[in-house]
Image (cartoon, rainbow, N blue to C red):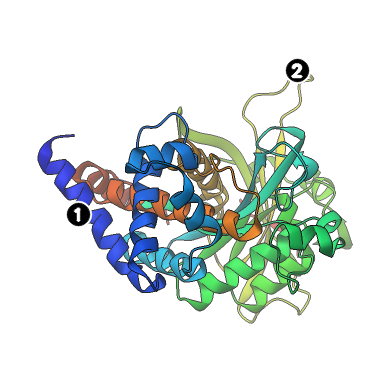
Amino acid sequence: MDDEDLALWVAGLDDLFALIADRFPRVEPRLQASAYVRGLLAPLASKNSWTLAEAAGNKSPDRMQRLLNRASWDDGGVRDDVRGYVARHLGDASGVLVVDETGFVKKGTRSAGVQRQYSGTAGRVENCQLGVFLAYTAPKGRALIDRELYLPKSWTDDRDRCREAGVPDDVQFASKADLALAMLGRALDAGVPAGWVTADEAYGKDGKFRAWLEQRRASYVVAVPKSQAVAGDAGKSRADVLTAHAPDQAWKRRSCGKGSKGPRVYDWAAATLPEDGTEPPGWSRYLLVRRSLTPDGKGEHELAYYLCAAPAGTSDEELIRVAGARWAVEECFQAAKNEAGLDHYQVRRYDAWYRHATLAVLAHAYLAVTAANAPKALAAASSRSRSRRSAVSWHT
């Protein structure tokens, strides 16, 4: 990075902190937060209070720890400002809101929300915390825009334990889907330009989650298990049973987006589901199925299933595009952890987790917006935009 690029980088970060300045009643916490974010963006092997303090020139980690645990500032307000910042710089009517969770492996039992639970990040049961996040992806770029810490019932049923970890008494148990809906509600209420919502089957199989999206008239493509009950001509059937009757001509070979190794190409089939009177006026529900191109060791092709709801006449290509957009959140997690220290924290308190996560989300958003506004990134985004294609009845 030459001197001119460095000057632009610093100026952009200063502009972002000017945007959130009102969230800090005093100058000292704001300056410390700026130093914290600069440390998160620095090429440090580890980004904890000690290393961030050293990078900022502090003699001890006390100031960094005070920022996360005791200083007066509005992390919820900063979250809202970051969401607006991403929407202004990356926003597009075709944008997709993506819900997913990620795990943070921890030792001990005192960190808020920690317990032995399945972590998709680790691919196994671990002693960990789980954070539910909301990402925004559009042709110009992608970024995390919201965060919630999942508190299992083992925590919310033990109020003394909660108080020791700084969990407010009014925080009760909320499922991961409940946390996701809270974040989606904030984004939609704030007018984030998003035409779609997508999520994996942990959320998609939840009927209340899908019903809420339909009530908000938020089009969605959500993964569901093969056993998902789906409306068919003769009542409800399993998704895999309906798919077994799809004619050969229903399958279309399409890319659902660009991956690290090139286009993600699969065979896809889509069906319009029978109306039952509960869909929003002018809308249809769809079953979308993805089939791998190559068989597994047993000679079978892997299938993935999605329930969708959107205005009637929505094209198969659009449903496929949105299904592919879900991978964006995995890329956001990887970048936020590797480049913005999302998983490098050493805090135990509930409020401190939110403060660290908010500043890491801010740092990641800054990286995403900066990359999107680089000339090469803008050219690539323009090229992608120009090339985008715009009774159970299988589409043939």
Q: Residue at x 54, y 62 (%)?
A: 70
Q: Could you say which is closer to the camera, residue 258 or residue 284?
A: 258
Q: Amino acid at mark 2?
A: Gly
Place of residue 45 in the rendered image (x, y in percent of width and height, measured from the top left): 44, 28
| Residue 195 appears left or right of 351 | left
Q: Quadrant of residue 1?
A: top left
| Residue 119 appears left or right of 116 | left
Place of residue 110 in the rendered image (x, y in percent of width and height, measured from the top left): 74, 47
Q: Is residue 284 visible?
A: yes
Mark positioned earlier in the residue sequence (1 or 2)? 1
Asked whether the residues under the numbered discs 1 and 2 touch, taking CB atoms below 8 Å apart as contact, a structural biologist would say: no
Disc 1 marks which residue?
A: 11
Look at the numbered disc 1 and give the secondary structure of its residue: helix
Task: Determine the residue located farthest toward the top in the rendered image.
Answer: 297
Q: Residue at x 36, y 44 (%)?
A: 58
Look at the numbered disc 2 and give the secondary structure of its residue: loop
Place of residue 340 in the rendered image (x, y in percent of width and height, measured from the top left): 43, 43
Q: Could you say which is closer to the camera, residue 231 or residue 53?
A: 53
Number of residues whose C-alpha sits closer than 10 Å to that of mark 2, classed few (under 14), some (14–19) or many (20 or more):
few
Q: Which mark is residue 297?
A: 2
Q: Residue at x 71, y 69 (%)?
A: 168
Q: Quadrant of residue 176?
A: bottom right
Q: Could you say which is closer to the camera, residue 291 or residue 355?
A: 355
Q: Residue at x 74, y 74 (%)?
A: 170
